Amino acid sequence: MSDVINLVDVSVVRSGTTILGNLDWAVAEGENWVVLGPNGAGKTTVLQVAATLVHPSSGTAEVLDERIGRVDVFELRPRIGLASSALAAQVPDSERVRDVVLTSAWAVLGRWRESYDPADEQRARDLLQTWGLASLADQRFGTLSEGERKRATIARALMADPELLLLDEPAAGLDLAGREDLLRRIDDLADDDFAPTVVMVTHHVEEVPAGATHGLMLRGGRMVAAGPLEEVLTSDTISATFGLPVEVQRHGQRWSARAL
Ligand SMILES: Nc1ncnc2c1ncn2[C@@H]1O[C@H](COP(=O)(O)OP(=O)(O)OP(=O)(O)O)[C@@H](O)[C@H]1O
Ligand SMILES: [Mg+2]
C-alpha cells in the first residue's frame, strides 16, 4: 500500500505563531480518516497542506506520492477533491446547481463558454442523482439550504474523480436528519470500486461516519493522538483533545461523547 498523505515533521508558521507544529502523519490507501479537535486546533490548516494550498514552513509533505514543493501543483490538484464552507462561499449565488458540479471538470467556478464532453455531462448528472440533488439541478446555488449546499459542494469535489477527498466540516449546520443522511452518503462512497481516500474534519465524535477507520486528534496545532479509531477515540484522548473531561461511548460503528 502506498501513502496517500505523508507528512514528516511539518510545521506551519503564520505571523510568528506556530499554527501547526512538528506533525508526523501518514494516510495509507484504503484508510478513511477523521480529524478531530477544538476551534483553532489546526484542522483546516492540515487539510490545506494535504490540498497543496498551504506549503509547510518546515518539514516535508508528500501527497499521492508527490512531494509538495517539487511537483507542479496544478497537475496534482485535479487528483484531490476539497469541499469546505470557504470554497462554497466562492460559488456565485446565481450559479445553477448542475453547473456548480460540472464546472469542476475544468477546475473553474462560474460557467462561461467552456464546452463539456457528453461523458462529463453524464458524470455530473450521476453525481447529482447520487447526492440527492437531481430535482435541484436547475436551482440557483444561492437559494439552496445548508444541507443541499453541502451535498452540492461534495458532488463538485467528486466530479474530477479524485483519489483523495478532503471534507472540512461537511456536517456543520445540518439538522439531525440532514447529518445522518450526509454521513450515510459519505459512508456509501466506500462502496465504489474507485472510492477516494476520505479525510474528514469535524468537531464532534457523533459526526464520525461509520466507514471511518482512523483518527487524527489535534489541539493547539499539535497532535494529541493518531491511529486506528478504536485506539484513539477513547475518553482519555478526547478529554485531552478538547480540554475537558468527557466520556466517549461506542455504538456499533458510531460514537458519542458527553462531558463528565
Ligand atoms: N494567516 C494567519 N496568521 C495568524 N494565525 C493564523 C493564520 N491562519 C490561521 N491562523 C490561526 O491558526 C489556528 C489554526 O487555524 P485552523 O483554521 O487550522 O483551525 P481549525 O482547527 O480549522 O479551527 P475551526 O474548528 O475553528 O475551523 C487558528 O488559531 C488561527 O487563528
Ligand atoms: Mg477549520
Image: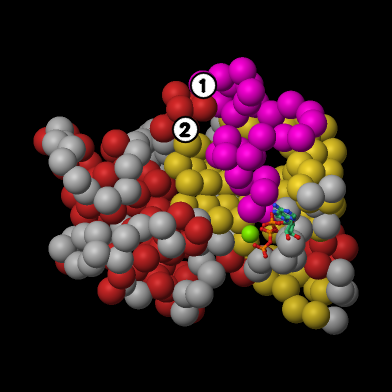
Residue visible at 24% across and 64% down in the picture: 94
**Residue 78's quadrant in the figure?**
top left
In the picture provided, is 90 more to the left or to the right than 66?
Answer: left
**Residue 159's quadrant in the figure?**
top left
Which residue was labeled with disc 1? 72
Figure disc tally:
2
Residue 97 is covered by the magenta coloring: no
**Mark 1 or 2 closer to N-term?**
1
Residue visible at 51% across and 66% down in the picture: 171
The percent coordinates of residue 34 (x first, y second) are 63, 52
The percent coordinates of residue 103 (x first, y second) are 27, 44
In the picture provided, is 172 more to the left or to the right than 232?
Answer: left
The percent coordinates of residue 55 (x first, y second) are 66, 34
Q: Nearer the viewer, residue 70 or 197?
A: 70
For the residue labelled by badge 2, is the local secondary structure a helix, a strand or a loop? helix
In the picture provided, is 258 more to the left or to the right than 1?
Answer: right
> How far apart are the two marked residues, 1 and 2, measured between alpha carbons?
9 Å
With respect to residue 197, does 1 lie above or below?
Answer: above
The amino acid marked with disc number 1 is Asp
Res 22 seen here: yes
Indicate if the residue with disc 1 has its beta carbon within 8 Å of ligand 1.
no
Type of colouring: secondary structure
- Within 10 Å of disc 1 (Cα), the crowding (few <14, some 14-19, many 20+) is few
Please tell me the numbered disc located at residue 77.
2
Q: Which of 70 and 240 is in front in this view?
A: 70
Q: In which quarter of the image is the C terminus?
A: bottom right
CB under 8 Å between discs 1 and 2? no
Q: In which quarter of the image is the N terminus?
A: top right
Residue 48 is covered by the magenta coloring: yes
**Residue 91's quadrant in the figure?**
bottom left
The amino acid marked with disc number 2 is Arg
**Where does the magenta region start and end?**
43-72
